[in-house]
Amino acid sequence: MTPTPLPRVHTMTMPDGIRLGGLLWEVDDAAGIVLLRTPYDARRHIETGRSWAGRGYHCLIQDVRGRHLSFGEWDPYQHESIDGAEVIAQLRTHFPGLPLIAFGASYAAHAALEGAYGAMRHEQSAPDGIIVLVPALGLAETAWNPDGAPQIEHRIAWWHEHGIGRQSREPLSPAALANRVRQAEQVGVISAAREWSWPTAVFERWERLWKARHTNVRSRYVELTAPLLVVTGAHDFFDADARRLAASWPSDSHLVTGPWGHRLAADLTDPHAREQFDNSGGIGGIIDGWLRAYTPFAARIGRLEPARYVSAFDPNSGSWQQSRTAA
């Protein structure tokens, strides 16, 4: 067996001179290249890079602007379209002729989708395939439940830990988080944040978060032609958004779901259920099957409507239930 290659530190320079850093795995006779852009430190995604290299793909895991190995100002959910499009363009130049897959979970799923949108909008070659897991579609989707209730606790926790500066901070203690939630419920999320000693720019972004509008995925991504694989979970707070994305995608889409939350298989705490899930091939097996179905990402020919597929993991039988739905 050929050993998985070690990654090398990789940098790209954006048109405004900002350098974005990450880790790049390169393999012999690559089937394609996978791009993952994250705010959570590329060095914490080593296993993801190794898994893609093991599948025979080059893999670039890059920190988004202003985070960890990348320079610039960290402004959540604001730069991923422009930066993502430029990264895709440079990868296309460096690896000519190889199919490119945009991949990511949570915020990185937003980066994958927005990079594809930016490439399409700037008349560049968009990704050939897109894989997103528990996707955070945008600011508004992180701030509000589908029923309109505010995600106060989640947002306070996330912005304290990840929303300020190049490095993530230690999370708030349960007591400190509960205190801030009480403040926000009493005086409002904006007024409460004035007491948290946040930098002015971060406070302004916090205000923008609560004024943001939901993403109209049907109109925003209408010109994208890449097939889409969406992995959600019945207990994930982005589940409704993931389903909306898959149902409105302009090309073929495959929705994968199961009895888990935002941490996917890590939420399967029952040992028997986890064993059944692993024996079924897990989400990695679903990805492998999707790659076999769509590689080399040939254009759809002769079909007027996109195909819609759903795979649901049944913990009772320990198997995946497959179905095709109406477009």
Image: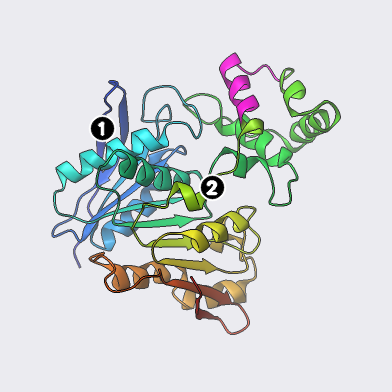
- Compare residues 87 and 262 and report the one nearer the observer: 87
The quarter holding residue 269 reads bottom right
Identify which amino acid the numbered label 2 is placed on: Asn
Dominant secondary structure (helix, strand or loop) of the stretch shown in magenta: helix
Q: Amino acid at mark 1?
A: Thr
Whether 198 is among the magenta residues is yes
Q: Mark 1 sits on what residue? A: 11
Comparing labels 1 and 2, the label whose residue is closer to the camera: 2
Q: Secondary structure at mark 2?
A: loop
Q: Residue at x 28, y 27 (%)?
A: 14
Distance from Cα at disc 1 to Cα at disc 2: 33 Å
For mark 1, give the secondary structure: strand
State the image coordinates of residue 61 (x, y, percent, origin top left): 34, 44
- The 10 Å Cα crowd at callout 2, few under 14, some 14 to 19, many 20 or more, is few
**Residue 2 lies in what quarter of the image?**
bottom left
Q: Earlier in the sequence, mark 1 or mark 2?
A: 1
User: To which residue does mark 2 refer?
Assistant: 216
- Farthest residue, direction right: 186
Q: Is-magenta flag for residue 310? A: no
* Quadrant in the picture for the N terminus: bottom left
Is 283 left or right of 298, judged from the image as shown? right
* Mark 1 crowdedness (10 Å alpha carbons): few <14, some 14-19, many ≥20: some
Q: Is label 1 in contact with label 2 (beta carbons under 8 Å)? A: no
- Residue 291's disc is none
Given residues 128 and 260, the one toward you in this image is 128
Vertical comparison of 161 with 300: above or below: above
From the viewer's perspective, tell me whether residue 228 is left or right of residue 119: right
* Residue 60 point in image, percent of width and height: 29, 45
Q: Position of residue 225 (x, y in %)?
A: 33, 57
Identify the residue at the far front of this view.
304
- Magenta range is 196-208
